[in-house]
Image (tube, rainbow, N blue to C red):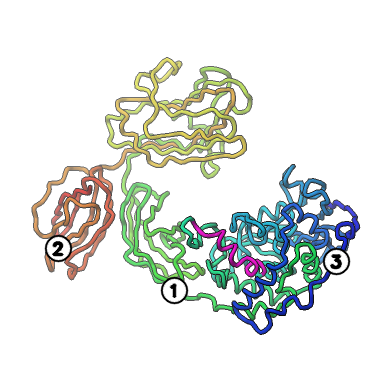
Amino acid sequence: MKTRLLFITLGAYYFGFSQIPTDYYDSADGLSGFSLKTELKNIISNGHIDQGYGALYTAYLTTDNDNYYEMDNTVLDMYSENPAGADSYSYAHDTNGGTDPGDACGSTGFSAEGDCYNREHLFPQGFFDSASPMRSDVHHVVPSDGEVNGGRSNFPFGIVATATETFTNGSKVGTNGYPGYVGTVFEPIDEFKGDIARCLLYFATRYEDEALEAAVDGSGEWDPHTAENNPMDGSTAEFYESWFINLLISWHNADPVSQRELDRNEAAYNFQGNANPFISHPEYVEMIWTVTPPDTEAPSVPTDLAIVTEEATSIDISWVASTDNVGILNYDIYIDNSYNSTTSNTLYTITGLSSETTYDINVLARDTSGNTSELSEVIQGTTTVNNIIFEEDFNDCTTVGDSFFAFNEASDKNWVCEDSFGQDDTGSYQMNGFREDVASRDWLISVNSYDFDATNTELLSLYLDYRFGSTPLELIYSSDYTGSGDPSIATWTNVPNISIPTDFSDSEEKEIFFDQVDVSSITGTVYVAFRYYSNGSPTRWTIDSFKLIEKQELLNTPSFSDDTRFTVFPNPSNGNVEIQFVENQNIESLEIYNLIGKRVFSTTNIPTTNDSIELTNLPKGILLVNITSGSQLITKKLIVK
């Protein structure tokens, strides 16, 4: 438990204390709906004096002083207060504008709960560009432990279904379980849900114009994606999206106004000259807003799921977008009846597959309220064959020497095999030079050479991560290295199309995965090597999942047909074409390849009633259109400019 106590005389900060006038809301009498909301805005805007962001710590002496739970005059923080027992930590009020002793967050920083407290915007200031007076309004800017404030981030409030982080008083972050929103949310404890709801409804009233103006895009139009997680709906009236209004009203009703809130409202009025009307008159909430039934309508099922491309370890799929009464958020991809991945697009590459394997694939749609469609019909995709030229996963340090050997050109530092730290924390190879700040020239070289003229279209995959220092890593090859001895006397060239990053950071570990990069411009028989020349600021480089494969090519050059059973129009094309068929013929399959054998489109079992198929966004280049009809394969050439 961390407690910093500083007992003060509150009167030293306020020479007079006045109450909210009894006629403060008289001009709102008889109004309802958004007319009432607008009149309340006029009332609470009149007399509001922006005291400045730094003055909030002074305000907290009276607005957020614990005279209700421990009653020890410490800071009352809704994110850390434990109403059922002793707090895990507490803070004395800061009388020096955020420098000592409370708010060390801005100077020494924090790494755990109890380190320091700062100012939490219940409505995140990033949503209104930190504009004044919103930034320093004590009615929605409250004291908070720095660690919990950071954990809340700018996530909207919600009901956590599955927590990813739980704080000491029970506040938590996790996936939302409240209908109407799919995403991460922050949930405070029940004791303060009504308090927070009324603060946010105050914000929607006091700043119905100002917040909207700050959130519009460059064209002056409201953009709901200006700030991720923003619950505003783009209107000055409703202000928040329906699901968020429903949530706030439910919290408002379940947690009525407390004496602590009444006292805080009076103190805030004395501090900046205005009050929160939803504390003085809780009935105003439902006089303005009505609860909208949550969206329960599921989106339509994705249709026309099709295989676009099949590779050795990946399959590209596409489908026609679903429809929904509110809006589609994303799609879930299922492989062999198990969840695989999520995308917001209708074209997706499924990766990490095994070669020469057939997979059952289907898709479901999810709307912005969290409703999901039924799964689409299943299609089957089959990965192709790729010949592995050279592969090392570094999972077995006893056999790594069969693939790579280390050479020390300078220093006694060297590559070292590890049983972890690699991709998915599997085995890896690392530079040892990061352990001491010494000059180091080290190599990791392939044991065998490889004849690039004996294979076609070689593809290289590689995983790297790096941290500390500023020493680059090179991936190079040589055709005149002998396979032993000092490699520095040989001629080495950078492997093509592999750009190893150099955006170093001393504190952040970064990773990159090169997936099937075309290195086929290499010719002759070559050795491959990693070269590490320390510049005095050593970097810890990690290597894993090194694989060189030969891409499967078309086995022969097709003979183009003048067969009139189908035509391709227009040809040449801009990528959008119509393939027309003669009536009543049995078309078993339609496949389109590029000249290196990559399939860019595929479909089967075309109904005999179809007389054409329209295709869009075909890739540029020369394409081969294959139609299988009966026992015959008909091929035509298509040029896409």
Residue 292 in which image quadrant: bottom right
| Mark 3, secondary structure of its residue | loop
Q: Considering only vertical position in the picture, is 154 above or below 297?
A: above
Q: For the residue marked with disc 2, what is the amino acid?
A: Phe
* Residue 581 circle label: 2
Mark 2 vs 1: CB contact within 8 A: no
* Residue 325 circle label: 1
Q: For the residue marked with disc 1, what is the amino acid?
A: Asn
Q: Nearer the viewer, mark 1 or mark 3?
A: 3
Q: For the residue marked with disc 3, what is the amino acid?
A: Phe
Which residue lies at the image location 57% right of the left edge and 32% below the top edge?
540
Whether the magenta-drawn stretch holds residue 353 is answered as: no
Residue 255 left/right relative to 605: right
For the residue carrying disc 2, how many other residues have a C-alpha within 10 Å: few (<14), some (14-19), or many (20+)? Answer: many
Alpha carbon distance from label 2 to label 1: 37 Å
| Mark 1, secondary structure of its residue | loop
Residue 560, position in %: x, y? 12, 48
Q: Main secondary structure of the magenta part?
A: helix
For the residue carrying disc 3, how many other residues have a C-alpha within 10 Å: few (<14), some (14-19), or many (20+)? Answer: few
Which residue lies at the image location 55% right of the left edge and 24% below the top edge?
414
Residue 26 left/right relative to 5: left
* Residue 17 circle label: 3
